[in-house]
Amino acid sequence: MEPQSHLFKQKAKEALDDANLARALKNMHAGFQVKRLKATEKLPEFQDLRERGREIKNHALENLDFYLARFEERVTEQGGQVHWARTAAEARDAVLKICQSVDAKTVTKGKSMIAEEIALNDHLSNAGIEPIETDLGEYIIQLRHELPSHIIAPAIHLNKDQVEETFRENHTQLDPNRRLEQVQDFTDEARTILRQKFQSADVGITGANFMIAETGSTVIVTNEGNGDLTQTLPKVHIVVASIEKTIPTLEDAATILRLLARSATGQEYSSYTTYSTGPRRPGDQDGPEQFHVVILDNGRSALLGTEAQDVLRCIRCGACMNHCPVYGAVGGHAYGWVVPGPIGSALDPGLIGLDEAHDLPNASTFCGKCAEVCPMKIPLPKIMHHWRVREFEKKLSPPRFRQGLALWGWFAKRPAFYRAGTAMAMGVLGRLGAKRGRFAKLPLAGGWTKFRDMPAPEGGTFQKQWAKHVRTRGGSRT
Amino acid sequence: MGKACSHARWVANVTSARDQILGDIRRALGGEEAPGHAEAEARLAGHPRGLIPKRAQLPTAKQAELFAAQALAAAATVAEVGSPDEVPEAVASFLAGHNLPQQVKLTTDPYISGLPWDRQPTLETATGRAEDADLSSVTSAIAGVAETGTLMLASGPDRPTTLNFLPDNHIVILPKDQIVGTYEEGWDRLRQQGAMPRTVNFITGPSRTGDIEQTLQLGAHGPRRLHIILVDTPD
């Protein structure tokens, strides 16, 4: 998809004024945070498993060329085909070519963020092939011509009344007076409509949570069962996956899967975890006749060996965004690209460029919750900090910000001036604000005082107070 | 500069995407030369186990209990019978309990085929892959994983995958001696049986979605009900 991350500030502002969005995002606390906490508490080994998961992914990344080549070898041995794509364009062309080779009219799709990344739906539509999203959330946003706002709950930004409107507008073949009240009414309606699509599709496209080098298997983890119908019923199954999804063995998958569902939805295990190895075998009564894996790089290999490499450990559980105060306020669309939230802020600058995405690493309070809940122990704030430094070096931040920082830097590097300057400022502000104890307006601090009062300083600078504290406690500086 | 650029483009065009991606990875990881991958080779050959949760390390007798409790927690239903002979009756009574027609589509693996279906004359059985009209299926499983109440099913000529997903009601027959503690033990069982099957399904409870207002709803696209019949096996 075309990145819109340069519009982050404007879109975030609009999102904050959107009452429907605020209502929808409110469900996240009970829905994701509480359930995750309960699930992790039920498994005493959870924290140790995070460390194991981290080690597996690090090992896989350090041997990625080897494991990818082995994966390809195994897929080919089983009668499948691997297609390599350096760019989004190469990946969508590869998919289109396969679809055209079987004269496909319609294509069903399981939820895949890689398919979103390469803007596959538009590419297929333009070539006269109808793509049909089958994950309920993805189906809803496809009808609404929207993009997913969350990697595991694509329609999290919507409320039931909005979905009702969408279904009534689109499912005109159904009785206009039918009941659409309970969540079950919506689920049943989508189920009935999509059943016909599953059966008539020529090609099924899914993503992959993992590619297993040991066996050449691709793995999908779902709750609805749509991914399985997508890949079992049509005569061709195409998997689109990015290079970093590769892990060594089935045992490694078992370890990481103990983390995935618990971190994502707070389930012990997702309803369906499916390992696909090659096309249907002799004697099989169902399953695809062709099995293709399109492996996408699109900027990921360039992150290896850099300070941002750790983002490639991500297993796309969504825990970081589920716990992020910024995501919780602005939702996913403001981020302007496929992967939103803290992982997006850490990953997107590496994939779509800092020029486009430099606002994202700044969309953080650095509260650290994202790193705390990440099952793969990705140091998300540290990587965002890395991008902020690059942003400063590339002179992408606003001039006023840079000037202010330069001024502060000048003082900070000259302790005598710094002490004198801050002592003077504290003194003046302390006297001015002594009466009310706070400022409602302050020159040069409008960004702060526009939304809240600035407390007036009491007493001396921090350094002065600390020195006094050390003296009275009789302690020593360590 | 311009020359270098066009040279790079020329190189990119003649190098295959595969070789370029693998080469880029190798260079990024620190070297033009393919480094040794002895550790990785050993990992693939030995597929060592990771950390196994304590909850899954139970005596065999306790594993069936844990399996049933976890499956129930995942919104499956569980029935127990004393011997394989009682399975057809248990299937019929599940269908009757939900006011479902007495019709099932069966897998044709030796275990399911060997059950005395003819003792339940009102129960119509058929075999083959699932079609849209099939309301209920009966399948076997490779293993039941006690850790999370998860069923492990493998595809094969006698076990079509569609039976696990298309019908509204999926009934799985699981002899208790096929219950293992962990996913890893399940993989070991499968490895003993030979090559990796085309499809391996780990199934935990019925189909569900939380995509609308984070409200849990069962029966999204796959089965609305998952019913597990545990069959007692001699110790």
Image (tube, coloured by chain):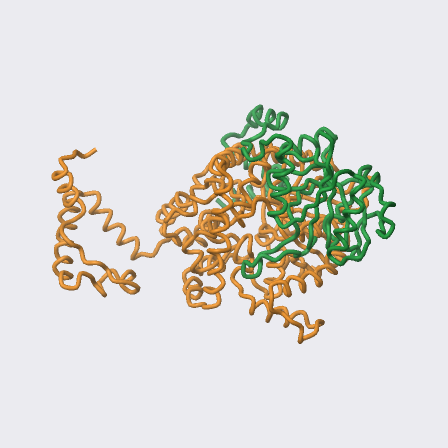
Chain colours: A orange, B green
Q: Which residue occupies the foreground of this view, A112 or B213?
A: B213
Quadrant containing the C terminus of chain A is: top left
x, y percent for residue A364: 39, 52
Of B169 and A206, nearer the camera is B169
**In the rendered image, which quarter is residue A153 located in?**
bottom right
Residue B182 in the image: state x and y as whole percent.
Answer: 61, 34
Q: Is residue A93 above or below residue B36?
A: below
- The residue positioned farthest toward the bottom in the image shown: A177
Image height of A85 relative to A215, above or below: below
Q: Can residue A85 be seen in this view?
A: no
Q: Where is residue A311 shown, x and y percent of the image?
A: 48, 43
**Is A77 situated above or below A37?**
above
Estimate the x, y position of residue B59 in percent, counting from the top left: 61, 30
Q: Which residue is drawn at 29% across and 57% down?
A: A400
Asked whether, in this view, residue A138 is left or right of residue A41, the answer is right
Residue A287, visible in the rendered structure: yes
Q: How many labels does the image show?
A: 0
Quadrant including the N terminus of chain A: bottom right
Q: In screen coordinates, is A256 left or right of A428?
A: right
